[in-house]
Image (tube, rainbow, N blue to C red):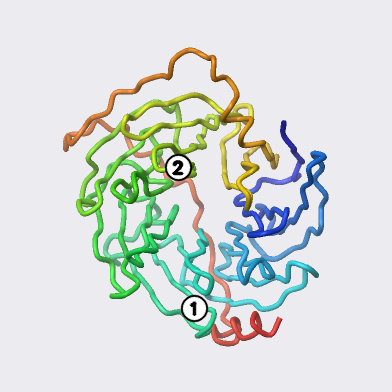
Amino acid sequence: MEMEINLENLPFDLDFHPSSPIVATGLINGRLLLHRYSEDLQLQRLFKIRVHRKSCRAVRFVNSGSVILTASPDRSILATDVETGKEIARLEKAHRAAVNRLVNLTETTIASGDDEGCIKVWDTRQRACCNSFEADEDLVSETTYISDMTYVPDSMQLLASSGDGTLSLCSLRKNKVQTRSEFAEDALLSVVTMKNGRKVVCGAESGAMLLYSWGHLEDCSDRFLGHSQSVDKLLKLDEDTVISGSDDGLIRLVGILPNKIIRPLAEHAEYPIEGLAFSHDRKYLGSISHDQMLKLWDLQELLDSKQDASSSQMVEAESDNDEMDTDPLPGNKRKRTSKGQNTTSAADFFADMDDS
């Protein structure tokens, strides 16, 4: 059972409302779409608005779902009222480079990552940027972009994967990059923590999945193949299982230690998967792809289906092996873009959000 709708343009990101049956998508043409979904398999569009001059690369609900933030290569972050669709505040020049990712940290903090490897943490109570983590200026290139981030709340640390093949661990308490891994010779596109925080798993552009041990993030300890093309998205299902979205259009269920491709779950034909997310009640798995479709899949049906299929495909892993056979690094998948103009301070931006 699934719901789907043609977004009519390439989507870059999606996010579910934290308590209501609403899903947001950001499109390549700078538009933000909100849809309400229902048990009768219907998707109702709530609004479609132009939020950025350039593409809308990232979308995240904040303030208990009353506001949605979007980010763009024009370097701006925009706050939009979810009920009315009206602009609340716009922070121009939020970064020096194109903003590529937004991730919720706590109820009052969010993180943004850009195309030059810079990460900023914003505190909506203090109405300011409270942490900033810069990439080494000597290493900044077209592949330095922040591809994904995941928050580790127990230690107040932020993990970030980069297109240059590095994994960074940022401490919010100490306001510094604590650890940066060696170059993996493979663009890292997605990152999750597994095994109760003991393992960090990254999806790579070659189709490999790289495993790092917590406390030893300088180099990966395990690496296994199984995806025919790049592993663009990872979504943690539980401590032992992750859902992957690949450039070949397949959504797979993947086991971690033992490492195995358990089975395909769903697909977008042969179109690359651009985003994966769970609904607030984890009833639905949302996916977007280069086929311009938004699909909502009944998660339990996906997991229950094909249980009688043949045994899982086991994939050999290179455990604790420093000599990795990796494919040559392809070109940067993201385009770097021109910069915008500064018109709003961070304090005013978050003050306007509070006033809404």
In front here: 111 or 91?
111
Dot 2 amino acid type: Asp
How many numbered circles does the render carry?
A: 2
In front here: 145 or 254?
254
Q: Is residue 235 above or below residue 141?
A: above
Q: Residues within 10 Å of mark 2 (few under 14, many from 20)?
A: few
Q: What mark, if any, has residue 123 been given in the picture?
A: 1
Instruction: Please state the horizontal and vertical placement of residue 25, each as a whole percent of the image.
Output: 67, 53
**If the image is split into quadrants, where does the N terminus sit?**
top right
Quarter of the view holding residue 157: bottom left
Whether residue 354 is visible: yes
Quarter of the view holding residue 56: bottom right
Q: Residues within 10 Å of mark 1 (few under 14, many from 20)?
A: many
Q: What residue sits 56% from the left and 81% below the top?
A: 342
**If the image is split into quadrants, where does the C terminus sit?**
bottom right
In front here: 310 or 170?
310
Dot 1 amino acid type: Asp
Q: What residue sits 83% from the left and 49% below the top?
A: 44
- Judge depth for marks 2 and 1 and give the one in front: 2
Q: What residue sits 49% from the left and 72% below the top?
A: 109
Label 2: state its secondary structure: loop
Q: What mark, if any, has residue 238 been given in the picture?
A: 2
Q: Specify whether 185 is left or right of 333.
A: left
Who comes first in sequence, dot 2 or dot 1? 1
Q: Are marks 2 and 1 in contact (CB under 8 Å)?
A: no
How far is the residue under mark 2 from the one under mark 1?
29 Å
Whether residue 292 is visible: no
Instruction: Please state the horizontal and vertical placement of residue 166, each as a whole percent of the image.
Output: 30, 52
Instruction: Please state the horizontal and vertical placement of residue 34, each as a whole percent of the image.
Output: 74, 56
